[in-house]
Amino acid sequence: MEFPLSQPVVARFEFVTEAGSTNDVLVQHATGADASAWPDLSVVVTDNQTQGRGRLGRTWLAPTGKSLAISVLLRPELPGGVPLPSHRLGWFPLLAGAAMTQAVRDSIPAHHTVAGRATAATTAPATDPENQPPTHEVTLKWPNDVLIDGYKVSGVLSELLPDARGMVIGTGVNLSLSEHDLPTLTSTSLLLVTGTAPVTDEVLARYLTRFTALYAALLAADGDPQKSGLHDTVNELCGTLGAVVRVELPGGTDVIGTAQSIDEDGRLVVLNHADGEVQAVAAGDVTHLRY
């Protein structure tokens, strides 16, 4: 498979016809004997991942050729070769989620979203609703899922390298899955939303272009998510903010409350309905509750 749009965007690009896990493949390359040949922003991609996994040990599987698994190697350094402070690493799943949210928005023809709400781009008269195309809300669910109208189209899994001097960001996106292919009842695909199978290279190039731009801005701003604009970008895209959520914390406890903000370390700040206390959540499985 050729990727003329995607290959020039990153430092090294490898498409493999099959992989158990693209994250595992890239970690092996990044830590093996030829590690120096795999620089910052090296990418491994497949449309046939046989042992994909998501957060909390969940499996992530899809029929061959109908989704993409994308892994990006990061060896982040600030200007002058200074290592990125470890407390900033929590922003990378959000960065990847933001990049994919933007790419998905760009991949839905005749639609665009503003401030978390979708509007139709059309020449049809506004007074004729029958000629208006359907609108879709494309949002980021903290920390790293992309939703279209509340249905998951993409997810992110980040893993530190063994030496903790870099990380691999794995992202899966559902391209042309039919209703019968969907892994869960809360999933969707670009095909199901638009009615047209997307061009794989176009979707991937949009993601990598958005990703590299956000990444470059973050490093240029000395890893500061506010100065780089990353914090504002994530806030604008994040549909979790303002929602009533259940957060399943590591260890098995739950917090039900209102998601208020994202703090400077990328943590979700939740107003706990049980005790009225504000709690910053660094990791957890989030469910948007509807009453």
Image (tube, rainbow, N blue to C red):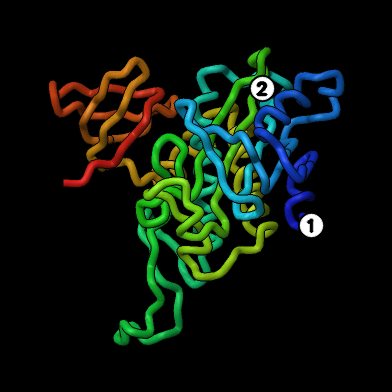
Residue type, label 2: Gly
The quadrant the N terminus occupies is: bottom right
The residue depicted at 39 percent of the width and 63 percent of the height is 136
Q: Residues within 10 Å of mark 1 (few under 14, many from 20)?
A: few
Q: Secondary structure at mark 1?
A: loop
* Image quadrant assignment for residue 168: top right
User: Which of the two discs, 1 and 2, labels the residue nearer the N terminus?
Assistant: 1
Q: How many numbered marks does the figure carry?
A: 2
Which residue matches tag 1?
4
Picture residue at 13% right of the left edge, 21% below the top: 275
- Please tell me in which quadrant of the rendered image residue 32 appears: top right
Q: Residue at x 76, y 19 (%)?
A: 31
Residue type at tag 1: Pro
Q: Position of residue 266 (x, y in %)?
A: 43, 29
In which quarter of the view is residue 197 placed? bottom right
Q: Nearer the viewer, residue 151 or 220?
A: 151
Residue at screen point 31% across, 37% down: 287
Q: Which mark is residue 166?
A: 2
Q: Is residue 254 above or below residue 96?
A: above
Q: Residue 39's spot in the image, x, y percent?
A: 78, 30
